[in-house]
Image: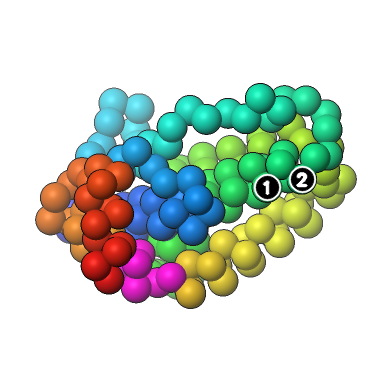
Amino acid sequence: MKDDERKATAYHEAGHAVMGFVCNRPPKSVDIKPDCCGNAGHTCFADDSAPFKRYLDCSPEKRQYLQARVLIALAGTTAHDLMCPGREHDVGDKRDEDFAHQLLRESVIWDERNAALAGFKMQARKKLEGNWHKVEVVACALLTQDVLSVGEIQSLLSSD
């Protein structure tokens, strides 16, 4: 990757990772290594699918779980947009938004997915703006190390 692409990817993945901590769902790892599927980086979370995820209930637990997942999905694009306002969205951004849409589609909590998605985008932006220094710390570490474990991210965020 070119330097500007690495930097953009580092901020994108740092957005996912930091939002994971904000939502009490820390990632297992984060990297900015391209893979064979065309992803420029990846933030890996535990497969903690809540047992109620696919059921048509409106419990507070399901709402909280889905809100966290949607915010984390949107946080990469949001961080990238904050770093580079007015940029064109790429395939990774589309993938993340499609995943957020899928999560909303699986829920009966929200009737209007597009309005819900817009609201979540605003929430993600506010949360990342309030934690921007953390995004920068994680992005800078990714640019020097390429891969960070949950322990390394926790250490970075606690020393910040």
The amino acid marked with disc number 1 is Gln
Name the one closer to the observer, 10 or 1.
10
- Residue interval drawn in magenta: 131-136
How far across and how far down the image is residue 77, in percent? Answer: 48, 56
Q: Is residue 2 visible?
A: yes
Residue at 42 percent of width and 36 percent of height: 45
Helix, strand or loop at mark 1: helix
Q: Which mark is residue 60?
A: 2
Q: Viewed as shown, does residue 131 lie left or right of 72?
A: left
What kind of secondary structure does the magenta stretch mostly adopt? Answer: helix
The amino acid marked with disc number 2 is Pro
Which quadrant is the C terminus positioned in?
A: bottom left
Give the labeled residue for mark 1. Answer: 64
How far across and how far down the image is residue 33, in percent? Answer: 23, 39
How far across and how far down the image is residue 57, in percent? Answer: 83, 33
Q: Which mark is residue 35?
A: none
Alpha carbon of mark 2 to alpha carbon of mark 1: how far? Answer: 6 Å
Q: Viewed as shown, does residue 38 lie left or right of 76?
A: left
Residue 11 in the magenta stretch? The answer is no
Residue at 57 percent of width and 62 percent of height: 124
- Seen as rendered, the residue at the extreme left is 144
Vertical side of 131 occupied by 67: above or below: above
Can you tell which quarter of the image residue 142 is in? bottom left
